[in-house]
Image (cartoon, rainbow, N blue to C red):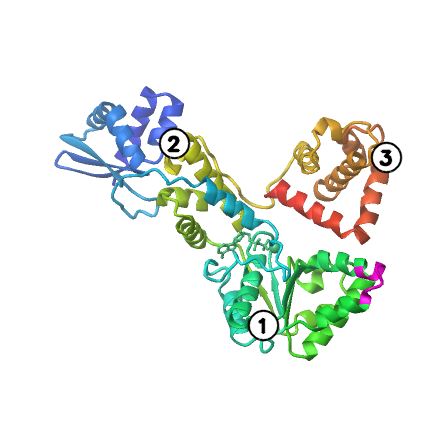
Amino acid sequence: MFDVWKNVLAEIEQQTSPANFATWFQDTSLVTAKDGHVIVGVKNSFYVKQLRARYYDLIEKALENNGIKVKDIDFEVVLKSKNKVRPREVTTPKPIKEHIKTIRATRKEPGPSSNGLNPKYTLDNFVVGSNNELAVAAARSIISSPGSRYNPFFLYGGPGLGKTHLIQAIGNALLQDNPDYKIFYTPISHFYSDFIDAIQKGKGKEFNLKFQKLDCLIIDDFQFIVNKEKSQEEFFNIFNDLYQLNKQIIITSDRLPSQIKTVDERLASRLTWAGAFDLQLPKFEDKCAILRAKAELIGAEIEPEAIEYIAENVNTNIRDLEGEFSTLLLMSEVRGLTPLELIENGSVSVNKTSKLRPTSPKQVVDKVAKYYQLTTKEMCSKSRVSNIKNARQVAMYILSEELNLSTNKIAAEVGVKDHTTVMHGIKKIKNDLKLNFLLREQIEEIKEKIYG
Ligand code: ADP
Ligand code: MG
């Protein structure tokens, strides 16, 4: 019906610069044009003011040129879903720098508490959506009767989807209900290093005893379990002891045990005896709900359109969603503009899409260097200083594994003279990976940064 709007736009396009046209007219529509009362649909209230002030005459002329009589023109916010909402006044967010610091801090590993639990992670601030409702239902069941139906509780899913948050929340809730409960949260990598430490100090028995006394053991990031090490055997023993005593065991991993090459088959099957629950990527509505909850939590004001913009454009994970949200709020405070104004004037552009986004060799090299706090030039130098050399070899390894580059190409990318050095470097990292769980974690983190 309003195809005529296309013609109007075509005319306006000729009379404005491409940039202005794209900024101001791209998402406009004709809502009605009854009896000369024209209503133009726009994306948000920011456009209402600007279009009225700057382009009223131009629009009026273009409408008349296309046979539409104009008595007056009004602008109305029309959401993409075609729901109409009233233009709303936008207020500046409250000071929030401190809050953002707290958000950032809580994203780090748990605080110094000896049970490894960080009280910031609760079920109250874990937003339930279609991406996690089954896992949350199981979590609630564990809290009301630990050590029964969902034991062990195996939770898996990609990075940044809420695994740590949810299992920490279970731990905190259990502790709240049973203050004497002995709960221990540990990433598997710390379990491993503590174990080695204990053995070296001749305190293997104490280590084992400490775990046997627990009422609930929470192991995070199980994918970093090390193969054919005493630690895996030790973990298996502890697991069996606790399980037989009906103590709750909670484990997360980025994939199913059967997909972790390094894990003993018996252990792998035991971990999922009680089923496996996964956390999925949040859908648009889930993302909006999470952002709204975060805003409420820190008392920040952010326009619904800005929330929708972030939700629409961050398609990787919840960690990234939070990251973009915090950055936007921080910028908003620094620049004295509302989040939506920042989006509208192009100061921010969020575009975090698929994990499979293609990446260039240069990006990989830069990201690896940055991760190891080196400049690309330093990393790609001839230096034989061990941390620089190690970073260079990690870059070689990732270029080979992820981009399938030939060793000759890799040599050129990382500034070494021949491909045998590259072959040696890749082999070195592959070997190290067998035993070095820290290196594995680092490489996973780098990949997250590359694809995130
Ligand atoms: P993972 O352990 O799976 O890598 P995290 O538990 O660290 O992910 O979650 C990443 C961030 O996203 C954390 O800050 C966490 O609080 C937040 N988060 C994840 N899921 C939710 C949710 N459903 N509701 C609120 N915040 C969430
Ligand atoms: Mg985690």
Amino acid under disc 2: Gly
**Quadrant occupied by the N terminus:** top left
CB at disc 2 and ligand 1 closer than 8 Å: no
Q: Residue at x 46, y 39 (%)?
A: 97
Q: How crowded is mark 1: few (under 14 residues within 10 Å), some or many (20 or more)?
A: few
- Residue 259 seen in render: yes
Label 2 belongs to which residue?
A: 336
- Residue 405 seen in render: no
CB at disc 1 and ligand 1 closer than 8 Å: no
Amino acid under disc 1: Asp
Residue stretch in magenta:
198-204
Determine which quarter of the picture holds residue 227. Answer: bottom right
Q: How far apart are marks 3 and 2 (CA)?
A: 52 Å
**Residue 435, position in %: x, y?**
81, 53
Mark number displayed over residue 421: 3
- In front here: 238 or 28? 238
Point out the frontmost of discs 1 and 2. Answer: 1
Amino acid under disc 3: Thr
